[in-house]
Amino acid sequence: MTTLWDPQQYERFKSYRDRPALDLMVQIPGDLDPREIWDIGCGTGEHAALLALRHPGALTHGLDSSAEMLAAARARPGSVDWVQGDIAAFDPPRPPDLIFTNAALQWLPDHAALFPRLVSVLAPGGVFACQMPITFDQSWHVQMREVAANGPWADRIGHVDKVQPLATTAQYHNWLSPLAEVDIWSTTYLHVLEGDDPVVEWMKGTGLRPYLQGLGSDVEREAFLAAYRAKVDADFPKQPDGTTLFPFPRLFIVARRR
């Protein structure tokens, strides 16, 4: 099943989604003077465009599998080479000096092979900078899979979740350290969300997409969302001021090729 991205839905919580990417960007070594940059899983292209501004002497590419996301990216000003393609098949014609990837690689399997391969294509001294949500075991992801597996739609969407459980920090270190100097850390952002059902609205821009697209009608989609909403609301009650607190953990990796 092809999963379509909705750029407008994804960017409803833009400031919160941007923060980890910017936090990752400032950890790129200051002495790196890249000539070839790839933002893989670039989405709507904001971070690729920012990297192009930050490094005007570099050729910057933005890679994404989604035509919808790339259409939004191509509407941005600036000089970026936008490429539609699959990260799993990423094979750059020239060794990059920087591979930047924000909230994308959790969708792909076999990190034991993928991550060393991405680092291995870097030029000597090149940098791999990666951020991924640590969400597979978080309640809102567990509940999403439970609703899919236990409703009348189970035969169609009970096993469609593409988000992968991340490896341990030690595993990422052991996979990458033979190739690079590695820095790994994690943090939890406490998002203060506004509006009705903000956690469900957040997930409609990411993890819920393949489930909703696998359902046959708007009525069925609304039934699924109602069942999911009932579970999520119990874990994320509104605060006295009407906001919803949403702790969100993320993993960061910066690896510099030897």
Image (tube, grey):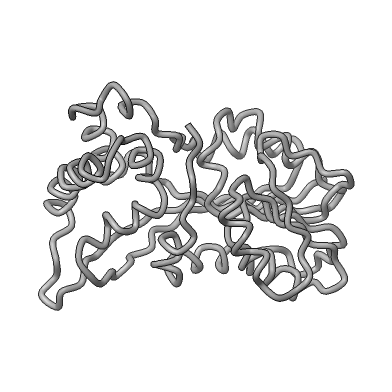
213 lies left or right of 176: left
Q: Which quadrant would residue 189 be assigned to in this image?
A: bottom left
68 lies left or right of 221: right
Place of residue 119 in the rendered image (x, y in percent of width and height, measured from the top left) = 74, 42
The C terminus lies in quadrant: top right
| Residue at 89% across, 47% down | 94
201 lies left or right of 125: left
Camera-side residue of 119 and 74: 74
Looking at the image, residue 128 lies above or below residue 179: below
Looking at the image, residue 59 lies above or below residue 136: below
Place of residue 167 in the rendered image (x, y in percent of width and height, measured from the top left) = 50, 34
| Residue at 70% across, 50% down | 128
Camera-side residue of 94 and 208: 208
172 lies left or right of 62: left
Q: Which quadrant would residue 233 be assigned to in this image?
A: bottom left
Residue furthest out toward the bottom: 241
Place of residue 164 in the rendered image (x, y in percent of width and height, measured from the top left) = 46, 35
Tally of numbered discs: 0
| Residue at 49% across, 46% down | 4
Place of residue 62 in the rendered image (x, y in percent of width and height, measured from the top left) = 71, 56
